Amino acid sequence: LVNRNVAPYLGMDSLGVHLHCYQKEGPIIKLWLAKRAPTKSHHANMLDPTVAGGHPFNLSLIENVTKEAYEEAGVPSEWIRKANPKFSDLTHDPITINTSKADGSCMKHSIYYSCDLEVPRSWRPRAVDGEVEEFLSYTMNELEHELRYGTAVRPSMVAVLVDFMIRHGQLKMGNDDEEILRKAMRNERLS
């Protein structure tokens, strides 16, 4: 077993799980983003999906999403069930990206597994484990603007959030461009 912070130095893949908690108000989709705590060793005060965590060896992907969802945002575990029509398990279709430090060192290959959960409009995430400073609600227009022009989102999470927008038909591009981008974020680009 290897600590996930050491994995890139050994050429190993980094695995992460994400849960996107969103609300619908008619045609408007609002996504809850987590502002990382100032005490985080990497990317403090930057924005993540509602729930973002590394993946340990001893849990299934859904078990880990359930655990992280409660720890980071107070999401009730009974909401994360395949039988819940508001829950979408997308772990069969991960995103793969390569990142590095700003100076080009420490190249890392990451595999990101995502799930979506439509939550009640009255629900608000709450930080439980201290890894999140606060949660912010973004409309898709606000999120697209931030992803295109801002610097608040953790760099490796841009692709994860763009993928959410594509899946929900919220990114302003042509359909062919969306499919090209979707494939580029997955191993399909290699086939």
Image: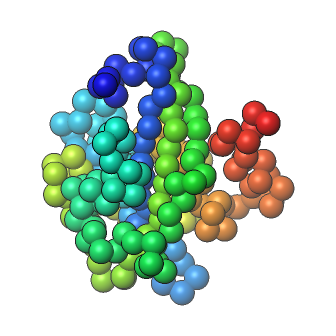
Q: Nearer the viewer, residue 12 or 166?
A: 12
In the figure, is residue 92 to the left or right of 173?
left
Task: Point out residue 146 in the picture as x, y percentages from the top left corner.
Answer: 51, 51
In the figure, is residue 157 to the left or right of 77?
right
**At 47% from the left edge and 22% from the top edge, which residue is drawn?**
12
**Residue 31, visible in the rendered structure:** no
In the figure, is residue 34 to the left or right of 142?
left
Q: Nearer the viewer, residue 143 or 49?
A: 49
Task: Point out residue 112 in the picture as x, y percentages from the top left corner.
Answer: 50, 44
Q: Is residue 57 above or below residue 71?
A: above
State how the image is colored.
rainbow
The answer to which image quadrant residue 175 occupies is bottom right
Instruction: State which quarter of the image contains the C terminus.
Output: top right
**At 27% from the left edge and 56% from the top edge, which residue is drawn?**
67
Q: Nearer the viewer, residue 107 or 171?
A: 107
Q: Residue furthest right?
A: 176
